[in-house]
Amino acid sequence: MVDIHSHILPHIDDGSESMEDSIEMLENSIASGVDAIVATPHLYPGIYMAPTTYRDELLMELREEVKQRQLPIEIISGRESYLSPEIYDYEKELGKLTINDSGKYLLIEFPMQEIPEYAARMIFDIQVQGITPILAHIERYADIIINPNLALKYIEIGCLMQVNIGSIFGRYGNRIQQTTEILLAHQMVHIVASDMHSPNSMSLGEGFEALSEIVGLEEASCLVEDRPRAVIENRSVSFPEPLVYRPKRSFRNLWGLFSKPLPARDDW
């Protein structure tokens, strides 16, 4: 399996607090079936702004520790970049923030409470540079929880969708768990990752059986192996056509159905 979202580098953000924690997180990942993991420390203007050179130093130190311990896992460079106009003040060449420094895939984090109006424009600017955005943990954004079909808008404009394995088990609350199941069942998710922050985080492979129960064994393998491996190898990612989510309405909700106009496609 390939885990494209993790905070395994020590002393850089809200993830691993020590080299010992990082090694334990990697050992947990290996035990769950992971053989490649992308280190994606936060880039959050004003909060987590460690320079790329510092990230690279930590990455080399962790790789050397892994080599000495003969751990069977590949550690790949990356960044979880908060979508904000200030990101260009930090790094004008966004290719340096992409997975494996390839200039092809960039892990992006939206503001949790509300997806900003400038999101679509910034995504377009990123794509013009030949970079495909991967939207991190989409199940946790308030707008997506309210309307899961909003994910279709970002799929249509060329983004890949990622959810956290822990969300399947309610690690972030019941509503996020329900949203995750909806997104998975309607083929709006392309990649599942761990987003591990500590040795207590769930490793990617720990949830494979539960993931398989939702989407089937073949699609589960695509979510944790085929597509994320294509990402780290800078290949194109293929995925099934997403399905529109049509929530079941109870009798007491029928008045709302007939009294309110359906949302326009632009409101997704």
Image (cartoon, rainbow, N blue to C red):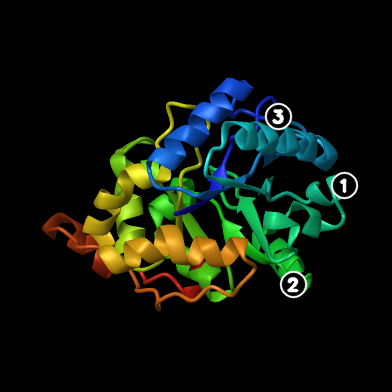
Looking at the picture, how far across and down is residue 28, in whole percent?
43, 34
Looking at the picture, how far across and down is residue 139, in whole percent?
43, 50
- Distance from Cα at disc 3 to Cα at disc 1: 19 Å
Amino acid beneath label 1: Asp
Position of residue 64 in the picture relative to residue 237 (left or right):
right
Lower position in the chain sequence, tag 2 or tag 3: 3
Give the mark count. 3
Q: Is residue 150 visible to us here? A: no
The disc label shown at residue 12, or none:
3
Amino acid beneath label 3: Ile
Q: According to the image, label 1 marks what residue?
A: 89
Position of residue 174 in the picture relative to residue 115 (left or right):
left
Looking at the picture, how far across and down is residue 251, in whole percent?
12, 59
Residue at the extreme left = 251
Amino acid beneath label 2: Gly
| Mark 1 or mark 2, whichever is nearer to me | 2
Lower position in the chain sequence, tag 3 or tag 1: 3
As rendered, which of 113 and 233 lies closer to the eye?
233
